[in-house]
Amino acid sequence: MSDARSHIEVYDYSGGIVGPGIEPAGTVRDGGTIRTGTPPGCWGPMITPKFQGGHEVTRPVLVEGAEIGDAIAIRLKTVQVTSLATSSGVMEFVEGRYLGDPFVAKLCPNCGATSPSSHIEGIGEEAVRCDGCGAEVNAFRFSNGYVIVLDRENKVSLTVGKDVAQRIAGDARTVAAMPDQANQHSILALARADISGLASRMRPFLGNIGTIPSRDLPDSHNAGDFGSFLIDAPHGYSFTQEELNEHKTDGHMDTNSVREGAILICPVKVPGGGVYMGDMHAQQGNGEIAGHATDVSGVVELEVKVIKGLKLDGPILLQHPEDLPFLAQPMSGEESRAIRRLAERYGQQSIEDNAPITFIGSGPTLNDATHNGLARAAEVTGLPYDEIMNRATIAGSIEISRLPGVVRVTFMCPTSILERMGVAELVREQYGVQA
């Protein structure tokens, strides 16, 4: 990796697949920065039949010195929305237009072409047309959908009615601020507007970010819940459960605290790690309950740092201090003094030095994801599984990131363990504690 640079910009994308089969965009030095413009995630790629994944993420960037069994800390320095509007909602599948999985293996119902090239013709749910035969070819429908306009400066948004949605659809790619190299159709062309006049705040984050898996797979399926759709699948990206567990890196988290100011620590499963990103959302509550949120184009800048010898199965998150659950927020000076008085009152000799840490867990269900997150925490920290359960209960929290199965397991972790893991310095920087 002698050609490593201190700063790399990436403006081309992987076509829905992540893994070692996608040519890297370059190599960045340890401590260097990566800057990109990301296209919208789910709905645009979903309605574009040639995509074999549900997102359009960047080509990976290798990190100098990162070896298998290390970790890469990704500091999110900039996460800014560029779209003026987007559209999203609850999805339904159209039978006869896919083989096993409509995110991965789309079919033209008329000519039978697999992953056909297509174009937009008109406005509305029948606008996606096969280039080969002209048939309507979208494998998805909204059961309930909306168009939402975005005020990026004031960080607010508003859903609009059908007339406004149709006007926006006439200039969909421009309003979406679609990057030049993006190959997806804009979901704004469908102009579905079931909710009008609903106001909300914006707080953007990245739904799919991390290091590449050690085998190619659809970018939207790089997690334990969506990844389960690949088990014994009837298309070219079929995995066994054991293979999925071995190769995936859980980059597709849809975790709303993976936002500007957070630090994400990711496993290295291929030489160089292969940092990629995409699927920015303008806003989302805990859980992405609708299955999809407000996918937007955006500008992202990251800073990367190699952590030698920190072997991970999935991501660790150092959340923005504002995002920490109440019981995992570091004690204030007044609270610390009260704790010392409480210890003296009962003759307790020691008070643990600790700081918050969050492990991402994923699985087919929320229960599976919670078990996975707890097990990962126990494996990495060396603390007993049952002790992690106790810590997450009284000095932390379990929070939903996505249905059906991605969670955050947050707890106060002893400083000595953070030091052994090699993350204590990052924790100190993030939370201002003496970790």
Image (spheres, rainbow, N blue to C red):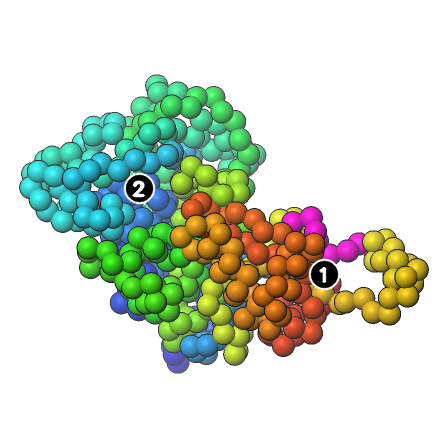
**Mark number displayed over residue 44:** 2
Q: Between residues 284 and 154, which one lies in front from this camera angle?
A: 284
The answer to whether residue 183 is seen in the rendering is no
Q: Between residues 295 and 375, which one lies in front from this camera angle?
A: 375
Q: With respect to residue 113, does 92 lie above or below?
A: above
Q: Residue at coordinates 50% horizontally, 40% vertically from top-left? A: 284
Q: Residue at coordinates 62% horizontally, 59% vertically from top-left? A: 389
Which amino acid is tagged 2? Gly
Q: Residue at coordinates 40% horizontally, 57% vertically from top-left? A: 224
Q: Between residues 390 and 118, which one lies in front from this camera angle?
A: 390
**Mark number displayed over residue 57:** none
Expressed as whole percent of the image width and height from the top left, the position of residue 344 reads 92, 63
On-image quarter of the C terminus: bottom right
Expressed as whole percent of the image width and height from the top left, the position of residue 58 reads 36, 57
On-image quarter of the N terminus: bottom left
> What range is drawn magenta here?
325-333
Read off the residue under disc 1: 432
Q: With respect to residue 203, does 219 lie above or below?
A: below
